[in-house]
Amino acid sequence: MKEKEELSKLKLKQIDQTFPTTKPIDSIIPVSCPSCNAAPVMDHINIHDKIAKCGSCATVFSFDQDIKDLALINEKVETEVVVRPAGIEKSYFHDELELTMQQPTGGGWIAMAIIMAFIAGLAYMVHVKDDITIYWSIGIFGAALFFFYKYWNKSNEKIHAVIDEKYLYIQYRPKNLMKDKAIRTQEIEQLYTKTVASNYYSLYAVLNTRDGQEHKRLIQYIDTRNKARYIELELEKYLGIEDRRLPEE
């Protein structure tokens, strides 16, 4: 008898357990009559037309707006949190934010150095064979040494993104033929990153100018997506812009 009672209690406990479901509770829409607040039975609910009939007061009502509201809630994108990646320095000075990273040009410098050294060797061989001036070989070899120096000094070549209440500045130091950019913060509507190649990304700004809206490239090459997204999110946070995905991304 005692064993039967324990078995009965065990069965009741199993029945009381919540049945597992793959749908979250937030996705369940409570349908009720707007007149008497009674819940209609399933036979009185038309899922396709999104209307229902109350069994208590016979009121016919629509629950289409409830479904739309739920869809808007589910479409909200969770805020992306990007931790500051290695290779980016962040600093504040008064109300000015500065983000600094290394220019991703090291591979280009070493490639140019090797090419110039090879050409310098060919020029010297031509000088020995055909007795042409050696200055060509010396000049090209000097260029090779310059590119070797640029590669050796690559850790000191930086990109600075500086922003204050009025302007966003993008500065290359040394410039390496890149012009500085100064953009009015009040013109910036959105920032986004775009894939340039398999290993590089660019940072763009959507600007509302007097001549209309334009997309302006701020930084041409960023070597990782984490760096690009971090710079984008930090600048948007400073400007008070809500991050959203654009078709150009």
Image (cartoon, grey):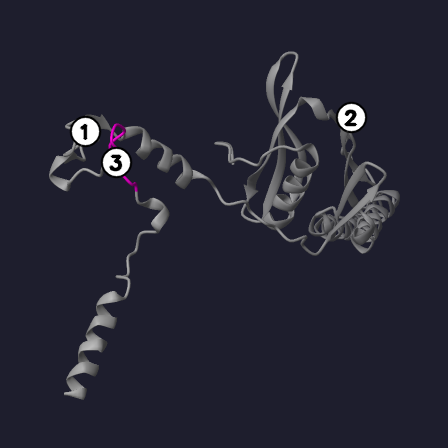
- Residue at the image point whose x is 15% and y is 40% from the top: 41
Q: Secondary structure at mark 3?
A: loop
Tell whether 150 sits left or right of 5: right
Mark 1 and mark 2 residues within 8 Å of each other at the beta carbon: no
Looking at the image, tell me whether mark 3 or mark 1 is earlier in sequence order: 3
Which image quadrant: the N terminus?
Answer: bottom left
Q: Is residue 71 above or below residue 187?
A: below
Residue on which the image places disc 3: 32
Tell whether 240 sits left or right of 141: left
Badge 1 amino acid: Asp
The verdict on residue 249 being magenta is no
- Residue at the image point whose x is 68% and y is 52% from the top: 84
Residue on which the image places disc 1: 49
- Toward the top, the furthest residue is 211
| Magenta part of the chain | 29-37
Q: Residue 46, position in %: x, y?
A: 16, 33
Q: Nearer the viewer, residue 225 or 112?
A: 225
